[in-house]
Image: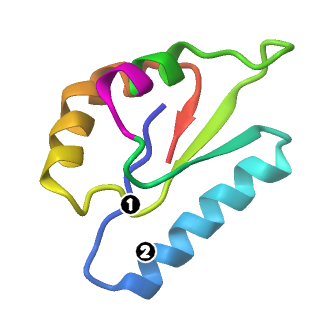
Amino acid sequence: MLYLIYGNDREKVRAQFRALRDKFSKKGVNIENVQEGAISEKMLEEKSSARALFGDITLFLFDNILGKKEEQEIFVSCAEILRDSKNYFL
């Protein structure tokens, strides 16, 4: 499942990001931060099909990743597999 948060009001966007992150955290979902610059098609494909040790779902946090054109293109090319994944991408 893919969640995108966008807008011109940085404070509102950050508040929505935190609210969704906290919602998943309270559900006991595994959370993994993805560092800026770590995005590649291979990495996104692996994360979309990854399963935690006991088959749990993972929330992958991408914070401020669409700032570079290269990352935007990679993200767009993988959007469908992220959307269809059992894991969450925020």
For the residue pair 6 and 65, the one nearer the viewer reads as: 65
Label 2 close to label 1 by CB (< 8 Å): yes
User: What is the CA distance from the residue labelled 2 to the residue labelled 1?
Assistant: 6 Å
> Horizontal placement of 10 versus 90: left or right?
left
Q: Earlier in the sequence, mark 2 or mark 1?
A: 1
Q: Residue at x 25, y 81 (%)?
A: 8
For disc 2, the marked residue is: 13
Magenta stretch, main secondary structure, is: helix
- Circle on res. 66: none
In this view, 23 is above or below 19: above
Percent of width and height locating residue 6? 31, 65
Of all residues, the one furthest to the front in this rendering is 37
For the residue pair 45 and 58, the one nearer the viewer reads as: 45
Q: Which residues are magenta?
A: 39-43
Quadrant in the rendering for residue 54? top right
> Horizontal placement of 62 versus 52: left or right?
left
Percent of width and height locating residue 14? 50, 76
Q: Residue at x 76, y 20 (%)?
A: 52
For the residue pair 43 and 25, the one nearer the viewer reads as: 43
Magenta run includes residue 66: no
For disc 1, the marked residue is: 5
Q: Residue at x 43, y 25 (%)?
A: 43
Q: Secondary structure at mark 2?
A: helix
In this view, 8 is above or below 1: below
